[in-house]
Image (cartoon, rainbow, N blue to C red):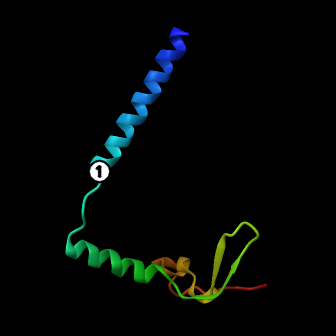
């Protein structure tokens, strides 16, 4: 019984310390950092052609095959998709 209580106390303290450590790492973005973040999001978010939900309620957005985010990589800029 003593070992179980010690383990429970250790786990509770670990969760407490971990949750407070995560809070200390947050900070507000400067105006310039916020603008840069918004610019990056605009380049990543592609308009979708069709959207649908599966039976679990998860929404899938279909992006045009030629506008896939993977093709934004510099090595794939002039890549052509080969459909067989």
Quadrant where the image shows the N terminus: top right
Number of callouts in the render?
Answer: 1
Q: Depth check: give the residue in front, 62 or 23.
A: 23
Residue found at the very far top of the displayed protein: 2
Q: Residues within 10 Å of mark 1 (few under 14, many from 20)?
A: few
Residue that badge 1 annotates: 25
Q: Depth check: give the residue in front, 53 or 49.
A: 53
Task: Name the spot of residue 42 as percent of width and height, x first.
Answer: 41, 83
Q: Depth check: give the residue in front, 71 or 32.
A: 32
Above or below, comparing residue 83 to residue 60 in the picture: below
Q: Depth check: give the residue in front, 32 or 3.
A: 3
Residue shown at 70% from the left, 85% from the top? 82
Above or below, comparing residue 71 to residue 33 in the picture: below
Task: Name the spot of residue 64 as percent of width and height, x first.
Answer: 62, 88
Residue shown at 20% from the left, 70% from the top? 30
Task: Name the spot of residue 53 as percent of width and height, x first.
Answer: 70, 76
Residue found at the very far right of the displayed protein: 84
Above or below, comparing residue 60 to residue 10 in the picture: below
Tell me if 39 is positioned left or right of 58 in this view: left
Residue shown at 54% from the left, 81% from the top? 71
Residue 9: image quadrant is: top left
Residue 79: image quadrant is: bottom right
Tell me if 28 is positioned left or right of 48 in this view: left
Task: Name the spot of residue 33 as percent of width and height, x first.
Answer: 25, 72
Indicate the secondary structure of the residue bearing disc 1: loop
Quadrant where the image shows the C terminus: bottom right
Residue shown at 33% from the left, 74% from the top? 37
Tell me if 25 is positioned left or right of 64 in this view: left
């Amino acid at each position: 019984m003593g070992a179980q209580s010690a383990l429970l106390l250790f786990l509770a303290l670990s969760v407490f310390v971990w949750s407070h450590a995560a809070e200390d790492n947050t900070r507000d973005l400067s105006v310039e950092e916020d603008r840069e973040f918004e610019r990056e999001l605009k380049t990543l978010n592609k308009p979708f052609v069709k959207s649908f939900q599966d039976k679990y309620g998860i929404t899938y957005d279909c992006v045009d095959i030629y506008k896939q985010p993977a093709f934004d990589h510099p090595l794939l800029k002039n890549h052509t998709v080969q459909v067989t």
